[in-house]
Amino acid sequence: MPCFIIPQYGNIATCQNRKAGQVRDRGKGTSVKLSIKFHPLLFQSSLAAGGVALMAFNYLQFSIPHGKGLITFSNISWSTLTPGQIALYAPLVAVLFAFTVLNLGLTAYFLYRLVLWLREPGAYRGFRDNPQQNQNAGIFAIVASLSMTINVVWAPLGFFVPQVSSNVQALMLSSLVAFLILFSVLMFLQVTFGRTWFSPGVERRNFNFVWLLDAFAFGLLSLTGSGIVTMAGSETIRTIAAIATLFTLVVGSLLLIYKMAFLIYSHLRAAKLPAASILPAFFLIVPIACLYGLSAYRVAEYLQPHLASAPHGSESLLITAAYVLAVAWALGAIYLVRDYLRSHFVKSQFAPSQWGFV
């Protein structure tokens, strides 16, 4: 009977008994039902969908000439494009549409499942109080995914919906409110779940790179805050967003530095790699570094006129250093897990750490 298992997080999927569901297994005459229970890491799928949508949007944004602001579908003059350009841009638009719908649909569905999960007696508390092998770090995928969805609404959704693209400034106040709510939730979760990681009896030497999901959430939240700083027309909104984003960047960077140092030291001391199912989590450093670099660049660009002592070009140095770190780490991680990529990646069961590649 098939079940999906998320390694390192226990069995979060159960195969129900034959009384429920009634899906026929041909040849054996038996009936089974596959039902995946809710787990916060399911938000990784909506997060990844949003990331793919933004990649397609950014390519169109910077490759097709258009007016000031974000590109929209109406900005593309299909009749003036060459056949080669149409062959490139048409699939990108299709990908953009598909993954925008997927992100918004999955977000709505998982939020519904989240509400039901929170209403289950003891579900949240039991998850929170299970820090062994950083199993409860998956809670931060919720904040990360919702932060990504805000960016999807601004750009990919606005690409197809003129009412959104023409009223981006009207969305800035509500976006700031959503950003501050997510900021408050993230800080609450960081304090609440962070305490469990240092509770008596917890063996942190068994933690793995999925422990960096909170730093990832801080990075995606910083991306949203810095986006408000870049796009908002109101100086008050920009200032509030800049201050909150700067605080988010500082806290997230300190977390990232501490956890990276601890995890690298632990793995070197163990003189062996972790289990194969968790190896792709090494790649979490790549998007985290890029998110922090881009967010810091945006905030530094906003703050530079207010800081006379800031050297000219310092904001460009931030984003360059972040991408150099990301590329160097990616190459090192590919070399480190080369055996996994050859032998396990295609054949492995579904694992949340695989999203590190996306």
Image (spheres, rainbow, N blue to C red):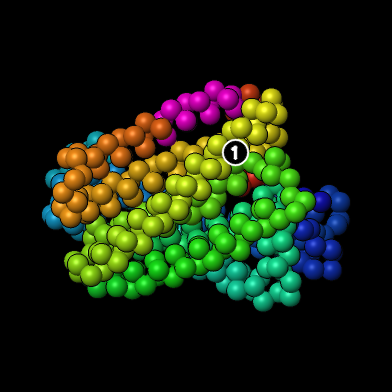
Pick the front one: 244 or 294: 244
Count of marks overlaid on the render: 1
Residue at 70% in and 68% down? 125
The picture places residue 70, in percent across and down from the top left corner, at: 22, 56
Q: Is residue 87 above or below residue 72?
A: above
The picture places residue 79, in percent across and down from the top left corner, at: 16, 48
Residue at 60% in and 45% down? 210
The answer to whether residue 298 is magenta is no
| Amino acid type indicated by mark 1 | Phe
What is the quadrant of residue 182 in the picture? bottom left
Pick the front one: 222 or 2: 222
Q: Does dot 1 land on a helix, a strand or a loop?
A: helix
Residue at 19% in and 51% down? 307
Residue at 76% in and 66% down? 21
Q: Is residue 301 left or right of residue 32?
A: left
Identify the magenta region: 326-338
Magenta portion: prevailing SS class: helix
Pick the front one: 50 or 24: 50
The picture places residue 122, in percent across and down from the top left corner, at: 74, 71
Q: Is residue 115 above or below residue 76?
A: below
